[in-house]
Image: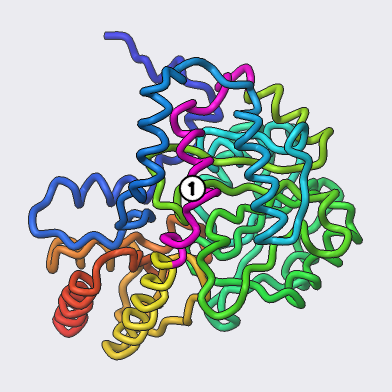
Amino acid sequence: MTDHTQYLSDAVTRIRPSGIRKFFDLASSMDNIISLGVGEPDYTTPWNIREASISSLERGFTSYTANAGLPELREEIARYLTEQFQTSYSPEDEVIVTSGASEAIDLAMRATVNPGDEVLVVEPSFVSYAPLVSLIGGVPVPVPTSIENGFKVTPEAIQDRISDRTKAILLCFPNNPTGTVMTSDELESVAAIVKQHDLLVFSDEIYAEMTYDAPHVSVPALQGMRDRTVLISGFSKAFAMTGWRLGYVAAPEPLASGMLKIHQYAMMCASTMAQYGAIEALQNGREEMLEMVESYRQRRNFFVGALKDIGLDCHTPGGAFYAFPSIRSTGLTSEQFAEKLLFAQRVAVVPGNVFGEGGEGHVRCSYAASLSQLEQAVDRMDRFIRSL
């Protein structure tokens, strides 16, 4: 029998499968599960967005769009970024509509990182960042954060990991998996280091609309940062459109032009019907989006308080819909805690170590679930901890 693994590239062989997907698949095969594992809204996409997409099909809009996306969608994205986050881009040549924010991250890295270049990745971080750097021959360099300072990255931690091969830094605030947000002053301190060392920033702001205690601060809106930032975002989280796979990237024209080359060869264009839905989301989706965000804020307040009540130390996340409690008091590793909790009490959470070494001793819990499910999940977690 042919050993097909011999045909796999070295880069693919070296990276590990997603730790999130492993637990999601395991939980999906079990009954009576409360899943706090997958990072997606528990809402269905608002009807007016779905209707706009359906209407586009009825009108026969089933062909390719421009590689960079529908001009009217790029104009809406540029307008939205200006109005909501005080940062401006030309819709003609600085905005590309992508197949999800995931593709946008991949484009940003492939267009700028050469083999051997180092990319600083603030950890804990979303599971795809470091593997995407590795797949193109770059070197991901973790920049640690910890619960002691609310998982905020410091200029000192960045400075310590910069070398003469450092090309870029990848930031994600509000953060997945910690929910941490950074203030304007804190990001200005980071920006000073970035400018001092002439670095590029990949800023994944997919959770920008989901901040609960203060307005979101967009990295390219900071003084002197627009020209050295690749802004990544999308429609999945704020507009409950995860399955539509629609995102975008905004960057200075030379960078956008480079990314467009890859996009046109690899993807051609994003889904046409999804793009028409996205236009409706930006034009008329804000009211329902704000209602969803307010609901997440209420669930955060309940869930984080409940975790603390059962003895799990948990910082208060300022955005996204994740809590990242410490489970060190149990004496278990992140993997052990997640597996034992799943089999003993049927609650699915994600081990913190899949988000980098700095995540060990924590688990990620998505509170994008109903209050009833969250109450049941906490009750089961309490029983589990008491049984140890």
Give above or below for 146 relative to 286.
below
Give above or below for 139 relative to 336.
above
Query: Is 317 within the magenta?
Result: no
Image quadrant for the C terminus? Answer: bottom left
Q: What residue type is labelled 1?
A: Ala
Query: Is 278 within the magenta?
Result: yes
Task: Please state if 284 lies on the left or on the right of 242 as rendered.
Answer: right
Rendering quarter of residue 41: bottom left
Tag 1, which secondary structure? helix
Most distant residue in the top direction? 1
Q: Which of 144 and 218 is in front in this view?
A: 218
Residue beneath the point at 78% across and 67% down: 190
Residue 191 lies, in percent from the top left, at 81, 64
What count of labels does the image hold?
1
Q: Nearer the viewer, residue 316 or 247?
A: 247
Task: Please state if 310 lies on the left or on the right of 108 as rendered.
Answer: left
Residue 97 lies, in percent from the top left, at 60, 34
Q: What stretch is highlighted in magenta?
A: 264-290
Q: Nearer the viewer, residue 115 or 194?
A: 194
Q: Is residue 132 visible?
A: yes
Q: Assign the magenta stretch its main secondary structure.
A: helix
> Badge 1, how many Cα within 10 Å: few under 14, some, many 20+?
many
- The residue that disc 1 covers is 281
Residue beneath the point at 77% across and 73% down: 156
